[in-house]
Amino acid sequence: MIATKNAELNELLKNFSVDRKAYGFQGINQGYINDTYLVLDNDYPLYILQRVNHNVFKDVHGLMGNIANAFQHLKDQNYTPIELLKTQSGNSYFKDEETGYWRLMTYLNNTTAYDNATDTGIAFEAGRVVGKFHQLLAEAPLGNFVDTIPQFHNLTLRESQFEEAVLSAKTEKLETAKAAIAFAKQTLEKLKILDNSKLPLRVCHNDTKLNNILFSKENNKALCLIDLDTIMKGYFYFDFGDAIRTVANTAAEDEQDHSKITFERPFFEAFIKGLESNGPFLHKEEIDLLPWGAVFMPFIHGLRALTDYLNNNIYYKVSYENQNLDRCLSLFYFTNKAIEEIGYMTQIVKNGLTPQV
């Protein structure tokens, strides 16, 4: 079975501008959406091969255009670039009639990723590289980026999808998720405080959880962000809040023991210092909303997981029936922690971040 898979993947690689040889492949099971393989030459890692899930990403051409556009700007002495390998016909991806859409990227050797921060150094570097990412993309024309998932972080849409799921869900699921549903309704009311009207649109990553940041194994310096499928227009508090939910929280996303879910103030402060190390790049109105971004992002991810659970797990990959509910409950628990820390976060970002004049 493995030999068959290797033979099929080697045939796929012939469509890209790489040396013709027999490569080895190692599956990477970290993500929820795409199928990812490490491409090996005699056990030495060379490339990342991915099949893009076109059931989730309907506009693969637009998605790959976004990534190619971003890569043109993500070049700096403090940001290590990843490159797309062209197909034989010069495209950034290959469409196979049977297996779908494939892309090939360079692999950064001697790197690692963390699911959660383990010290303030990692938290600082995460903040620094997220800030550098936004600085480098600040000059990228917004019109060159399409919405790969329209209204991805639109709370009104996610609320509507949640309400529809509640109406159609099975009785036993509604009972099992009763506490989560109640918390969702309460928090939706609190988040009406968010006002995007005065915020600048930016090119955002939109999925800046910590394990989407590559670190050097040699010195733990953050090198770059990966998994750019959701790079598109958005607001900075999206990327801020998504990072904080895995930097300040030391528990797994689907942790069932909620006593392990914490809000680590030293990690939050280190992340802010990392952002500030890039120099001013945020407007005052953006800074003012950052604490609520740390509430918004874990909540909206939890709401989506809850909605998927009620819809019988049709979006996220799950390894057991209630995994989406466990994700939801864990994310909601951290959401509540973040709500309790609003005053503290407000003071830290006010004192720690210099507005762009």
Image (tube, rainbow, N blue to C red):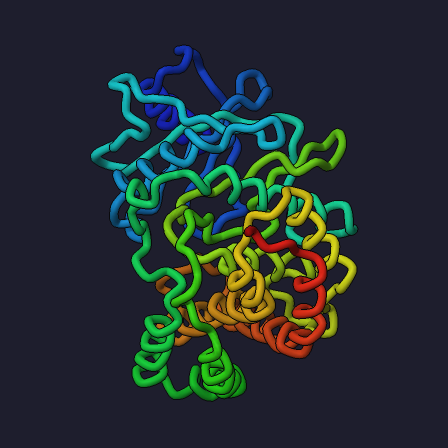
Percent position of residue 258, x then y: 68, 73
Which residue is painted at 32% across and 44% down in the image? 145
Q: Is residue 25 visible?
A: no
Percent position of residue 123, x then y: 71, 50
Which residue is painted at 35% across and 64% down in the image? 314
Using the image, determine if residue 146 lies above or below residue 257.
above
Which residue is painted at 59% across and 55% down in the image? 355
Extreme residue toward the top, this view: 20
Q: Is residue 36 visible?
A: yes
209 left or right of 300 in image: right
273 left or right of 282 in image: right
Q: Which residue is at the front of the view, 269 or 230?
A: 269
Using the image, determine if residue 96 lies above or below residue 352.
above
Percent position of residue 236, x then y: 50, 56
The quarter of the picture where residue 153 lies is: bottom left
Q: Which residue is at the front of the view, 182 or 313?
A: 182
Image quadrant occupied by the N terminus: top left
Q: Which residue is at the front of the view, 295 or 216?
A: 295
Percent position of residue 192, x then y: 45, 80
Extreme residue toward the left, this view: 97
Using the image, determine if residue 339 lies above or below residue 5.
below
304 left or right of 293 in image: left
Which residue is painted at 52% across and 61% down in the image? 286
Extreme residue toward the front, this view: 357
Q: How many marks?
A: 0
31 left or right of 17 in image: right
